[in-house]
Image: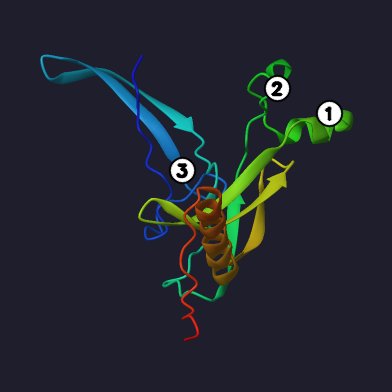
């Protein structure tokens, strides 16, 4: 068995597109004897994105809301009885099974390895797009409140910054 690393989606490379978006990919293998090819095979393959943003804001500013469109393509079923079938197969052929399988899609804004803002939703479709709103200010305020509550629970609340009357 041979492992092959396929790079993640790169929004800065307009030529790196999925098969559904028009990209064409083939595995090319050959046998050599003394450095001379003696046999070769070309095998067309499909490449699809598991999940990727369609576009990202150039800069992120605290206190702003951002609409980010995410796209996914041909997510696989994960029920053992479905094998490696696409997730959309159940919706097309066995509608009563369509709501048994879903994926939770999570978008996070990270800073120094920590989550600053997060948004999530559920999809039952194998291929689709969803625009999500991420509220940077609300998320920051929630994190501050969570940290304050943890400090209170741990017995060391931070000073409120008020001075005492004399």
Which residue is found at the position 60% from the left and 43% from the top?
73
- Which comes before the other along the chain, label 3 or label 2? 3
Disc 3 to disc 2, how far (Cα)?
Answer: 30 Å
- CB atoms of marks 1 and 2 within 8 Å: yes
The correct choice, above or below, for 54 with respect to 17 in the image is below
* Category of crowding for the residue at label 1, using alpha-carbon neighbours closer than 10 angstroms: few (below 14), some (14–19), many (at least 20): few
Q: Which badge, 1 or 2, comes first in the chain's sequence?
A: 2
Labels 1 and 3: the sequence-earlier one: 3
Q: Nearer the viewer, residue 145 or 25?
A: 145
Read off the residue under disc 2. 79
Q: Residue at x 48, y 65 (%)?
A: 56
Disc 3 secondary structure class = loop
Judge whether residue 8 can be spotted in this image.
yes
| Residue farthest to the front, as pictured | 166
Labels 1, 3: front one: 1
In the orientation shown, which residue stands out farthest toward the bottom?
Answer: 166
Look at the picture and state if 82 lies above or below 159. above
Question: Seen in the image, is 27 located left or right of residue 143?
Answer: left
| Residue 161 percent location from the top left of the image | 46, 76
Q: Position of residue 20 (x, y in %)?
A: 57, 47
Image quarter of residue 8: top left
Q: CA distance from mark 1 to mark 2?
A: 10 Å
Please identify, in this view, whether the residue under mark 3 or under mark 2 is nearer the observer: 2
Would residue 21 be seen by someone viewing this image from the given angle? Answer: no
Task: Look at the image and tell me in which quarter the N terminus lies.
Answer: top left
Q: Pointer 1: what residue?
A: 97
Circle 1: element type: helix
**Quarter of the view holding residue 126:** top right
Alpha carbons under labels 1 and 3: distance apart: 33 Å
Question: Residue 138 placed where, x, y %?
Answer: 60, 68
Report the residue marked by disc 3: 24
């Amino acid at each position: 068995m041979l492992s092959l690393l396929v790079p993640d989606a790169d929004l800065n490379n307009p030529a790196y597109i999925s098969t559904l978006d028009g990209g064409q990919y083939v595995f090319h293998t050959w046998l050599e004897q003394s450095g001379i090819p003696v046999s070769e095979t070309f095998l067309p393959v499909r490449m699809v994105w598991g999940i990727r943003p369609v576009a990202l804001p150039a800069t992120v500013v605290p206190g702003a809301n951002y609409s980010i469109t995410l796209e996914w393509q041909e997510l696989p079923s994960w029920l053992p009885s479905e094998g490696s079938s696409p997730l959309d197969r159940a919706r097309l052929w066995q509608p009563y099974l369509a709501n048994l399988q879903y994926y939770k899609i999570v978008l996070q804004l990270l800073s120094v390895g920590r989550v600053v803002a997060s948004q999530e939703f559920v999809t039952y479709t194998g291929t689709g797009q969803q625009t999500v709103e991420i509220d940077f200010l609300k998320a920051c305020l929630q994190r501050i409140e969570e940290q304050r509550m943890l400090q209170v629970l741990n017995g060391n609340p931070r000073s409120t910054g008020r001075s005492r009357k004399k």
